[in-house]
């Protein structure tokens, strides 16, 4: 029984600390705030219970008393509870109040600090909060007090220090903040900046002065969360802004997902500065466990000479089942293993195994052709796959009389009703099921104006069927898709 307050950082999952990540991996229950990014939430194990206790400015659907009650209830049930808070728990995060409550209730707790947007937001906008040639102090201030009352901040003292001022949770108070700075003697031409959704793939930065910042905020419809920075160091932003120089900065790309967990494509696009919108198009339900077809098949594994994987999801579920069942992986030593493509092969390599074969073209038809050529007399194949996938593979093998057993180890169901943002530059598909799921989810969209990047010709054919303008990556790999996206985006500059 323990509660751990973990600082999730300001948004970029790379700013989550190693200790924070390790704590999340052992969670039974996670209570999270609204400022915890999707990328960080995606790192939480699927077995953990997720409870959204997020608050908006002036709108607290879950009160602090209710949050405290949940922490106590889950901890006294003997669960490992993670209180996941945006930024740092103790930097205007009410973490101090929560651990006081836990201490009063004799609940063991631990605090894992996080990276605060007060510093990270400035850094991602090219603003060093301290610099020997400009300032010698840094001051972090909240823009509103308890119950949204005006703060009793001594602006005269702040202005006299001449240091960098960082105002958090202050968007609604930007006019009041700038006015009070000027009234305290600050030059209205003092450089200032506001960073919206700092460190995320949606970050926006606006530069101005203390005199002009309120108008800038209003004209650009700046939204929370936002960090206000006041000080001469803001003059360095244009020269030191490294984020906006990334090759895909400002581009909006949908990545259609049909599998859970971290996305290699999304991660690479984020590294290149892209605004990634992950659209979950299907839910994956494992068909493994006691009494499953896979369990029965593994008892007769000696009957097969080839083990065939058609997806990385299938690889993961297959070996997860073996581990949970306590099976000896050496039972597979007699098998030759085929994968539909190199991405599936990479999933296999995580288990210390290299594929014996994958085709030059990464689809079921090509895989079937290769297996027909490679299979000898009296050889039998075991195919583990999606319940409704890879039909071209099984149909072609049946057509030439190749013996095989077809074992479904998971099934996909479409996600219907989740809003789809189609105001994007590109949509990226890594599978034909991703296209179908996306089309169902975005049923009212006009796909004729949508540009799609596809990982193979079969995926591209389905996207074209729905009217999309399609480009196909030269190789059916994530890296090849990335290079094509960079090429296309470069053509638009």
Image (cartoon, rainbow, N blue to C red):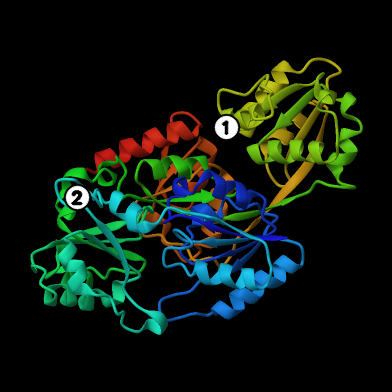
Front disc: 1 or 2: 2
**Which residue corresponds to mark 2?**
237
Residue at horizontal 64 percent and vertical 30 percent from the top: 350
Residue at horizontal 51 percent and vertical 66 percent from the top: 95
Residue 153: % across, % down? 28, 75
Q: Is residue 130 left or right of residue 201?
A: left
Check the image and report above or below for 370 versus 462: above
Choose between 430 and 298: the one closer to the eye: 298
**SS for callout 1:** helix
Give whichever of discs 1 and 2 has the lower sequence position: 2
Would you identify the image quadrant in which residue 374 lies?
top right
Q: Is residue 492 left or right of residue 424?
A: left
Choose between 194 and 106: the one closer to the eye: 106
The mark found on residue 343 in the picture is 1
Label 2: how many Cα within 10 Å (few below 14, some 14–19, many 20+): some
**SS for callout 2:** helix
Label 1: how many Cα within 10 Å (few below 14, some 14–19, many 20+): some
Answer whether residue 316 is visible to the viewer in this image: yes
Choose between 6 and 307: the one closer to the eye: 6
Residue 270: % across, % down? 40, 45
Residue at horizontal 79 percent and vertical 40 percent from the top: 321
Would you identify the image quadrant in which residue 378 lies?
top right
Residue 445: % across, % down? 44, 63
Question: Looking at the figure, which quarter contains the N terminus?
Answer: bottom right
Choose between 377 and 336: the one closer to the eye: 336
Answer whether residue 259 is visible to the viewer in this image: no
């Amino acid at each position: 029984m323990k509660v751990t307050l973990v600082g999730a950082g300001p948004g970029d999952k790379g700013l989550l600390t190693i200790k924070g990540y390790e704590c999340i991996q052992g969670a039974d229950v996670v209570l999270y705030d609204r400022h915890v990014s999707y990328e960080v939430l995606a790192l939480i194990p699927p077995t953990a219970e997720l409870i959204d206790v997020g608050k908006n400015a002036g709108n607290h659907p879950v009160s602090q008393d209710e949050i405290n009650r949940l922490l106590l209830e889950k901890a006294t049930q003997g669960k490992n509870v993670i209180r996941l808070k945006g930024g740092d728990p103790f930097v205007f995060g009410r973490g101090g109040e929560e651990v006081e409550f836990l201490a009063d209730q004799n609940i063991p707790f631990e605090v894992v600090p996080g990276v605060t947007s007060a510093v990270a937001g400035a850094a991602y906008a090219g603003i060093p909060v301290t610099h020997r040639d400009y300032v010698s102090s840094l001051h972090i201030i909240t823009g509103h007090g308890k119950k949204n009352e005006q703060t009793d901040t001594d602006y005269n003292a702040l202005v006299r220090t001449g240091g960098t001022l960082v105002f958090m949770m202050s968007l609604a108070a930007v006019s009041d903040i700038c006015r009070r700075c000027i009234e305290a003697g600050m030059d209205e031409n003092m450089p200032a900046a506001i960073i919206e959704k700092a460190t995320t793939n949606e970050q926006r930065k606006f530069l101005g002065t203390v005199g002009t910042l309120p108008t800038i905020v209003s004209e650009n419809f700046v939204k929370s969360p936002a960090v206000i920075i006041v000080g001469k160091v803001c003059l360095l932003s244009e020269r030191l802004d490294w984020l906006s120089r990334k090759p895909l900065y400002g581009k909006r790309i949908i990545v259609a997902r049909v599998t859970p967990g971290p996305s290699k494509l999304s991660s690479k696009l984020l590294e290149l500065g892209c605004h990634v919108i992950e659209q979950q198009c299907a839910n994956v339900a494992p068909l493994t466990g006691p009494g499953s077809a896979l369990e029965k098949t593994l008892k007769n594994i000696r009957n097969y000479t080839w083990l065939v994987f058609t997806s990385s999801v299938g690889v993961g579920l297959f070996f997860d089942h073996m581990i949970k069942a306590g099976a000896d992986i050496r039972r597979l030593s007699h098998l030759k293993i085929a994968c539909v493509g190199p991405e599936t092969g990479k999933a296999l390599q995580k288990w210390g195994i290299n594929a014996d074969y994958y085709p030059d073209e990464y689809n079921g038809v090509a895989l079937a052709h290769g297996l027909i050529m490679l299979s000898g007399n009296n050889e039998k194949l075991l195919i583990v796959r999606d319940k409704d996938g890879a039909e071209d593979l099984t149909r072609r093998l049946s057509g030439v009389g190749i013996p095989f057993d077809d074992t479904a180890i998971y099934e996909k169901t479409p996600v219907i009703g989740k809003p789809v943002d189609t105001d994007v530059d590109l949509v990226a598909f890594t599978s034909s099921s991703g296209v179908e799921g996306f089309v169902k989810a975005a049923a009212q969209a006009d796909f004729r104006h949508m540009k799609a990047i596809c990982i193979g010709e079969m995926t591209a054919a389905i996207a074209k069927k729905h009217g999309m303008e399609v480009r196909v990556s030269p190789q059916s790999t994530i890296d090849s898709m990335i290079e094509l996206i960079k090429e296309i985006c470069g053509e638009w500059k």
